[in-house]
Amino acid sequence: MRRVWKSLDKMRCLRKRSTIPFLGFLITFLLFLNLYIEDGYVLEGDKRPLRETSARPSSAERYVHTFRDLSNSSGTINVTYRYLAGAPLNRKKYLTIGLSSVKRKRGNYLLETIKSIFDQSSYEELKEIVVVVHLADFDLVWCENLVQEITRKFAHHIIAGRLLVIQAPEEFYPSLDGLKRNYNDPEDRVRFRSKQNADYAFLLNFCTNLSHFYVMLEDDVRCSRNFLTALKKVITSREGSYWVMLEFSKLGYIGKLYHSRDLPRLAHFLLMFYQEMPCDWLLIHFRGLLAQKDVMRFKPSLFQHMGYYSSYKGAENKLKDDDFEEDAVDIPDNPPASTYTNINVFENYDATKAYSTVDEYFWGKPPSTGDFFLIIFNKSTKISKIKIATGSDDRQNDVLHHGALEVGEKLVGTKKGKQCSSFITLGEFKNGNIEVQDVDHKIAFDIECVRIVVTAGQKEWLIIRSISLWTTQPPSSQ
């Protein structure tokens, strides 16, 4: 690790054009080293009152220790947190909702965000969540005043163990002076985003053992109604498949969901590279290095940015997620599956993109009678609804003019790969689209395949814009 630290020092002298390739190599080396440590994390910080202080190592020494912690099987980041309001319960919850907040020059949306979380949750959902607010500003007077407001407005949630307010003391932070100015950012901008990475790292570190899953929000967010039910539905549909990060908003560090077991690694990661780039860029590297290649984003979005002024200098920030819906429980599941087609694919618009949750689509050359688009599930599944849209706003003729939707069972191996041996037709496409409700009431078997069949050739190319499936229960074992 001493050699790695020396390498980091040398990075300061590298020319600008070599910074990114070297950083990529360094991130890869360090994270893969971390992948070999044990997963039995225990992250218990000692607790103390707001104004209590004690002698601690310098921030530079702690930063070196952060790198050394990678070879420590416990994965612990030793932080003495201050409990400002509430205390965690002994019982592990289903979901932790984490927010980090600092003093803003203009506007303060934290209380509205907390209110939205609780107001948009049912009584049963409230039993399964815990909200952790990290007040990450070093102005202790501001923190104390805000804690009084939070305590007054949300006392019953604090008493019930659903709301905690914490702080990681300033002396635990890495150095925020003399930071590297990557991307020609001004010094104050670099300091802001570097500290933000540390803020999030300490929040993640604290939340590791509170629940099974963790979702990150920002402190200026509005939630959709019953968002937890929608999250649980997606998580259940992914059982048996590998994922690192599921996304329920396309903006910033909003609505990013993790397994709690991955939080220690993510906390280490953000601290190691806190001065290199913004947190949302680091998350892309983290996800990829843990072998999740593709973005897994679900629509409609469950969380909406509502602030008008950024926490950085109070600058205007009116970004909105146009995929957000206030009532978004009816989010499609799209259980894990493989996709196949014999339609000639144009460039890289391959079959997986029609079934993906990202804003991409399948695009193929003119299909012939009998051509197909096939989805084979990893596990047999009960499906309640199927909705498929073809064509696009700018290519309205590239729709499926004549086609049928089928579901199948009895998966068998053939010379051309796996295939269902028995299919039932659910309906015909009309104007390039099809939606079938109550599939589970019409089909007696657990579905293993969904197939789109071209029933008449066409001269136009074919875009399959989206394939959305809703399940009724977790996929059953075969």
Image: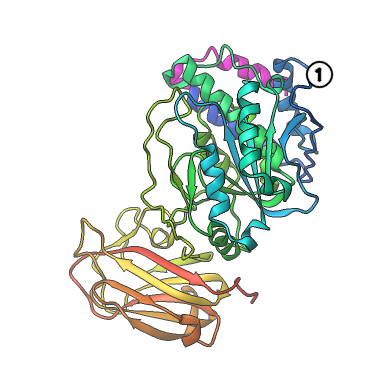
Secondary structure predominantly adopted by residues drawn in magenta: helix
Q: How is the image coloured?
A: rainbow
The spot of residue 366 in percent (x, y) is 23, 67
Q: Quadrant of the N terminus?
A: top right
Q: Which amino acid type corresponds to the residue marked 1 in the rendered image?
A: Ser
The spot of residue 242 in percent (x, y) is 61, 56
Where does label 1 land, which residue?
54
Relative to residue 250, is residue 342 depicted above or below? below
Tell me which residue sits at (80%, 50%) in the image.
90
How many numbered marks does the figure carry? 1
On the question of residue 292 being in view, the answer is no
Rendered image quadrant of residue 155: top right
The spot of residue 406 in percent (x, y) is 40, 81
Q: Quadrant of the C terminus?
A: bottom right
Tell me which residue sits at (21%, 55%) in the image.
394
SS state under label 1 = loop
In the image, is 66 to the left or to the right of 153? right
The spot of residue 213 in percent (x, y) is 65, 52
Relative to residue 473, is residue 8 depicted above or below? above
On the question of residue 326 being in view, the answer is yes
The outermost residue toward the front is 152
Residue 4 is inside the magenta segment: yes
Tell me which residue sits at (57%, 65%) in the image.
237
Residue 432 is inside the magenta segment: no
Q: Nearer the viewer, residue 237 or 107?
A: 107
Relative to residue 473, is residue 234 depicted above or below? above
In the image, is 450 to the left or to the right of 96? left
Are there few (<14), some (14-19), or many (20+) residues within 10 Å of tag 1? Answer: few
Q: Nearer the viewer, residue 46 or 357?
A: 46
The magenta span reads 1-18
